[in-house]
Amino acid sequence: MNGKHDDDAAEKRDDQPADHGEGIVFARSDRLKRSLSARQVQMIAIGGTIGTGLFLGSGKSLAVGGPASMLLCYAIVGAIVFITMLSLGEMSAFVPVAGSFCSFAGRFVDDAFGFALTWNYWFNDAVSTASDLVALQLLLRYWTVSFPGWALSLIFWAVLIAVNVASVRAYGELEYWLSLLKIVAIMAFIVVGIVVNVGGNLDGRYIGGENWRLPGGPFVGGIGGFASVFVTASFAYGGTESIAITAGETKNPTKTMPRVVKNVFWRILFFYILSILLIGLDVPYTFPGLNSKTTSTSPFTIVFQMTGAHAAGSVINAVVLSSVLSAGNHALFAAGRLLYTLAIEGHAPSAFARLGANQVPWVAVLASAFVAGLCFASSFVGAGQLWTWLQNIVGVSNQLSWIAIGIASIRFRSGLARQNKTHLLPFRNWTYPWGPWAVVILNSFLVLVQGWSSFSPRFDPVSFVSLYIELPIMLVMYLSWKGWRRTKVVSLAEMDLETDVHTADEDRVDDKAGHWAKRVATWLV
């Protein structure tokens, strides 16, 4: 490093001393507080992914594609996301910053690429928060239609803002316990789903695989139905990659991030695939209310209703509601950090980089929450319809983000090889080089073909726009920034592989779980 860079780095280290055992830190580009423990980060990974997409999106997937299409699509997308997470984990362990893959896109590929991707993903998380608030309205209708849905969204909108501007520790604790509740609910669902299938239902009959043999199933809608489930599955898995955004506020990130990547994804995949299989077996795709303009019933609630227990449906619906709130909490957290990253990188007004007393980017959080206010549009178009549109936008945005992670990973490894620094990696993606290429190619294919349903049996312009609007927007943002700033593709020899880098092995012993309940929770994640 040159002398000026050394002085700048030293100044940053003096202002913000590194925690003991956190590795060799060359320089730090953000001023966020590292307050999240490994326990909280692993639960945030679960909470940020398992939410609306699984609890409500699975109902739409079943109605549109049938049980076989749903199972296959969720499995395929799950495999793609696994490889994506290995690629992201490798970069995040080496460069643990709040911007995560959005920062990597600009740092390892092209500043214009990072600009377009970060704005796209910020909008993704802000819209995800909106979709979760809309989902609350859909779940409320299980109990009553007289209470205004917008009022419920307004109440929880205020709650999410309060939690996210308070402190990162408050956010982490709330997310930890809500995520733990999700895990317990899904485990209970798996048990109940099996019992219902073998005869523990109102009719006392063995269901087995009869719902797979219904007319039109198990592939409802043929190739069109199958293709359309991919965007729903991508929406459901969305948030897995955003766990890396917590790297900038994670204690001991070099050790924590690889463990989260390696362990958490398998838990998520297990919960998803088993839950999707049981939903397809127990709930017929013709069940009313799975997917409509005004309402959407969670398949989880339907399965618990099938037991005949009077309060079972209400209990699980309440749990699903809290799970959706958790997902919204995570999305708003990520949106605030991304807007903060845009500001410190000069891609957004500097006001968004302002931090509060607890080193929380409160201005960025409030701006993101304002966009999430889109949820109140449900009063005009119907909560079910609006949720479907938002789900399509977020699903495609997730796929574009995964493509970007694959591209950044390819460039990152090439830069390390050119500068002879590959040996410094604290965690390696064993699927490289074929893995990142597979992520780029497969996701690109899915983005293009999953809009089949908007053309058949007749052209649906609104559906078409919600499925493809992200593509021209991101392209225009990329070309505009590139033309204005005259940015160039980063040279492999000049790629910044020093700022924020963590390379030293860490021997810090993790916080002991202590209480037996905490040990169980740690094992689960």
Image: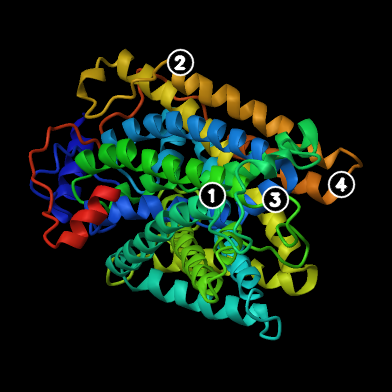
Q: Nearer the viewer, mark 4 or mark 1?
A: 1
Residue 135 on image: x %, y %: 61, 65
In the image, 435: left or right of 497? right
User: Is residue 358 at all visible to an observer of this figure?
Assistant: yes
Which residue is at 56% across, 59% downward? 300
What kind of element bears circle 2? helix
Q: Which mark is residue 198?
A: 1
Q: Nearer the viewer, mark 3 or mark 1?
A: 1
Mark 2 Cα shell of 10 Å, populated few (<14), some (14-19), many (≥20): few
Residue placed under numbered mark 4 in the picture: 460
Mark 4 Cα shell of 10 Å, populated few (<14), some (14-19), many (≥20): few
Q: Nearer the viewer, mark 4 or mark 3?
A: 3
Amino acid at pointer 4: Asp
Amino acid at pointer 2: Trp
Amino acid at pointer 1: Val
Marks 4/3: CA distance? 26 Å
Residue placed under numbered mark 2 in the picture: 434
Quarter of the image for the N terminus: give it.
top left
What kind of element bears circle 1? loop
Q: Nearer the viewer, residue 72 or 500?
A: 72
Residue 41 on image: x %, y %: 30, 52
Marks 4/2: CA distance? 37 Å
Marks 3/1: CA distance? 15 Å
Residue placed under numbered mark 3 in the picture: 284
In the image, 5: left or right of 396? left
Q: Is residue 386 above or below residue 141?
A: above
Q: Are the residues flagged by discs 4 and 1 in contact, CB closer than 8 Å? A: no
